[in-house]
Image (cartoon, helix red, strand yellow):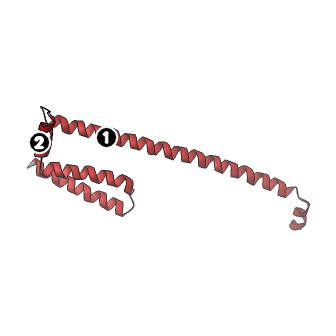
Amino acid sequence: MFSVITGIIGLVVAVAILVLMRRDRLHVQHGLGWILVATGFALLGFSPGIIDEVAVALGIGYPPVLGLTLAIGILVVKVLFMDIERSRVEIRNQRLVQRVAMLETDLNEMRKSWESTPWKNVADE
């Protein structure tokens, strides 16, 4: 019974992720990874013997260790990708701040040059 509940939870999570992607609450790049995780939960929930067969084929004596090891590996890879994305965004933000600062400097210089022009006083009259 527990395996059926796990499978249903995996399917519900997969549908929720699709809805979030459809409503633009979750970027497609991130959603696809989560759909794979939810599909894996559903697959293992509906047929839990798969992990046992794979563990036996790999020579692992205690099959749940394989599942936990895979889960930890997937989480480490996910965190790595999140850090890569965050670093990319931070670099992009830093460059945008620098561009804004340069534009502000140019704008201030243009204002100063406009105020020092002789025809500026004629336009004000």
Residue 62, given in percent of the width and then of the height, sits at 12, 33
Q: Residue at x 52, y 44 (%)?
A: 90
In the figure, is residue 4 to the left or right of 103? left
Mark 2 or mark 1, earlier in chain:
2
Give the number of the mark in front: 2 or 1. 2
What amino acid is found at the position of numbered circle 2 in the picture? Answer: Glu
> In which quadrant of the rendered image does the C terminus lie?
bottom right
Q: Residue at x 60, y 49 (%)?
A: 96
Mark drawn on residue 75? 1
Disc 1 is placed on an element classified as helix
Mark drawn on residue 123? none
Between 114 and 83, the one nearer to me in the picture: 83
Between 93 and 112, the one nearer to me in the picture: 93
What amino acid is found at the position of numbered circle 1 in the picture? Answer: Leu
In the figure, is residue 125 to the left or right of 65? right
Q: Is residue 26 visible?
A: no
Q: Please, is residue 110 above or below residue 97 in the view?
A: below
Q: Residue at x 11, y 37 (%)?
A: 56
Give the crowd class for mark 2: few <14, some 14-19, many >=20 residues within 10 Å.
few
Residue picked out by circle 2 = 53
Give the crowd class for mark 1: few <14, some 14-19, many >=20 residues within 10 Å.
few
Where residue 25 sits, quadrant-wise, is: bottom left
Q: Is residue 34 visible?
A: yes
Q: Please, is residue 60 above or below residue 9 in the view?
A: above
Residue 31, given in percent of the width and then of the height, sits at 34, 54
> How far apart in space, not on screen, are marks 2 and 1 (Cα)?
23 Å
Whether the residues at callouts 2 and 1 have beta carbons within 8 Å, the answer is no
Between 33 and 113, the one nearer to me in the picture: 33
In the figure, is residue 30 to the left or right of 59? right
